[in-house]
Image (tube, coloured by chain):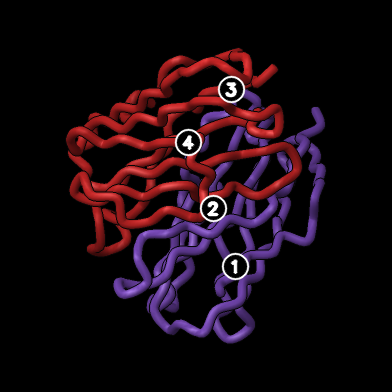
Amino acid sequence: AQTVTQSQPEMSVQEAETVTLSCTYDTSESDYYLFWYKQPPSRQMILVIRQEAYKQQNATENRFSVNFQKAAKSFSLKISDSQLGDAAMYFCAYRGGETSGSRLTFGEGTQLTVNP
Amino acid sequence: ETGVTQTPRHLVMGMTNKKSLKCEQHLGHNAMYWYKQSAKKPLELMFVYSLEERVENNSVPSRFSPECPNSSHLFLHLHTLQPEDSALYLCASSQKGGQLLTNTQYFGPGTRLTVL
């Protein structure tokens, strides 16, 4: 079974600085997808960024980028120029390939605090 | 984001009550999901509906009964719940299969359920 591990329950960063959130996963599949979601105090789960395992190029979305290391099964999220609105719980999620159904497996989350 | 809506946003019920949670998606998707988010636990997938057919039921107690009358609506009927069922219940939708851009799950704002 696939598992997703976020080893940092809490992280903090100064406004305008850069922070990296860690995520590792365990899978025997070669084709899969990875996601980062954020959940602010409103509890709305919002997609931040996504990556296809067969793509070697790391995904980027404005200030958000990932460091995808397939061999190491690592998928970290880098937030540049952190803003107060980035404060939230961040979840890493894994989805298998076409034959694995549509299940998303989530990590336990990292609570990010942004200090002014 | 109003692509996936959920009602009610908050619900308090006694153990003998019967209530229903409603989810509606306006994204043209054909797969819908129910997740449970309890304090200090990863999101747990409860049910998956694809093309209005239940394709996954993750050992959820029978006091939770899902219903998917069409591809845009998903219900979770609740009866004789226990206090440990208190949690945030999240609905999500996606396009079944396909490439990353189409199989990404989008979440509603959740229903905060308290069972007394």
- Identified at 51% across, 63% down, the residue is A94
User: Is the same chain shared between marks 4 and 2?
Assistant: no
In this rendering, the label closer to the viewer, 4 or 3: 4
* Foreground pick, A107 / A64: A107
Could you say which quadrant of the image residue A92 lies in?
A: bottom right
- Residue, disc 1: A75
Number of numbered discs on residues: 4
Q: Position of residue B100 (x, y in %)?
A: 32, 61
What's the amino acid at mark 3?
A: Arg
The amino acid beneath tag 4 is Phe
Marks 2 and 1 close (CB-CB < 8 Å)? yes
Q: Colour of chain B?
A: red
Label 1 – label 3 distance at C-alpha: 30 Å
| Residue A29, image quadrant | bottom left
Q: Are marks 1 and 3 in contact (CB under 8 Å)?
A: no
> Where is residue B68 shown, x and y percent of the image?
26, 36
Residue type beneath disc 1? Phe
Mark 3 falls on what kind of element? strand
Residue identifier under label 4: B64
Q: In percent of the image, x 20 and y 33: which residue is there?
A: B69
The residues bearing labels 4 and 2 have C-alpha atoms spaced at a distance of: 28 Å
Image position of B35 with respect to B69: above or below: below
The numbered dot on residue A36 is 2
Say which of B22 and A73 sits in front.
B22
Name above or below for residue A79 compared with residue A58.
Answer: above
In the image, which is nearer the foreground, mark 1 or mark 3? Answer: 3
Among the two numbered marks 4 and 3 on one chain, the one whose residue lies closer to the N terminus: 4
Rendered shade, chain A: purple
Secondary structure, mark 4, is: strand
